[in-house]
Image (cartoon, grey):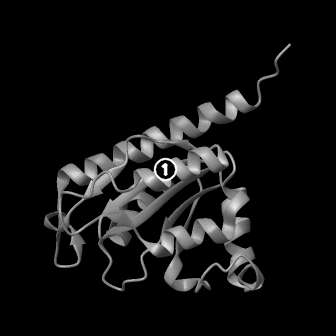
Amino acid sequence: MNLVISTSLNPDSNSRLMALKAFELLNKIEKTEFVDLREYPLPICDGDSAYAEPNVPVLTDKIKTAKLILLAVPIYNYSYSAAAKNLVELTGQAWNEKTVGFLCAAGGKNSYMSIMALANNLMLDFRCIINPRFVYADGSSFKNDALYDAEIENRIEGLVNTSVVLAKSTEKVANLKVE
């Protein structure tokens, strides 16, 4: 099972549009579930009682059983969204050894490196394999509440295809026995 997670809480989210395109493509290749964080209200991680909130174990289980996760993230103030960070904080160890790809939407062109803090966190804390083919789009790629950029659509397809290959390769390596 694969997951595409839209982390934006904005009803007019551009990153969600990218997530829906990725879901459409990935679901044609392998069984994939779409998760919209707007449908799973989460408490702010407090390191204590927040983990007992009803949606936390539901999302933790979804992440834990996925082999590949594409994370659609809005970029605000030169950083990935607080909702995305909160999701990772609340679901923690469920991210162990996943293949992860990113779809990022921002208002301008200058924040393209901002997802690296989250990528580093996932790599170092949870040993995730990060697809370096992340997709970054600014506001000019969207028009009338739709993705309106053929190059970005092609990059999403490349992210999906590369992520599938990485996930399968990672699974094969994990099953190797050292003699």
Residue farthest to the front, as pictured: 47
- For the N terminus, give its image quadrant: bottom right
Asked if 146 appears above or below 95 in the picture, the reply is below
Q: 163 or 110: which is nearer to us?
A: 110
Q: Is residue 28 visible?
A: no
Q: Residue at x 42, y 76 (%)?
A: 8
Q: Is residue 108 visible?
A: yes
Q: Is residue 44 left or right of residue 23?
A: right
Q: Is residue 152 left or right of residue 48?
A: left
Q: Position of residue 109 (x, y in %)?
A: 18, 58
Q: 50 or 72: which is nearer to us?
A: 50
Q: Is residue 107 left or right of residue 68?
A: left
Q: Is residue 162 left or right of residue 99?
A: left
Residue type, mark 1 in image: Ala
Q: 8 or 120: which is nearer to us?
A: 120
Asked if 54 appears above or below 147 in the picture, the reply is below
Residue farthest to the top, as pictured: 179
Q: Which residue is mark 1?
A: 119
- For the C terminus, give its image quadrant: top right
Asked if 178 appears above or below 33 in the picture, the reply is above
Q: 61 or 120: which is nearer to us?
A: 120
> Few, some or many C-alpha atoms within 10 Å of disc 1 (few <14, some 14-19, many ≥20)?
some
Q: Position of residue 11 (x, y in %)?
A: 36, 86
Q: Residue at x 52, y 78 (%)?
A: 37
Q: Quadrant of residue 102?
A: bottom left
Element under disc 1: helix
Q: Position of residue 130 (x, y in %)?
A: 51, 43
Q: Residue at x 73, y 32 (%)?
A: 174
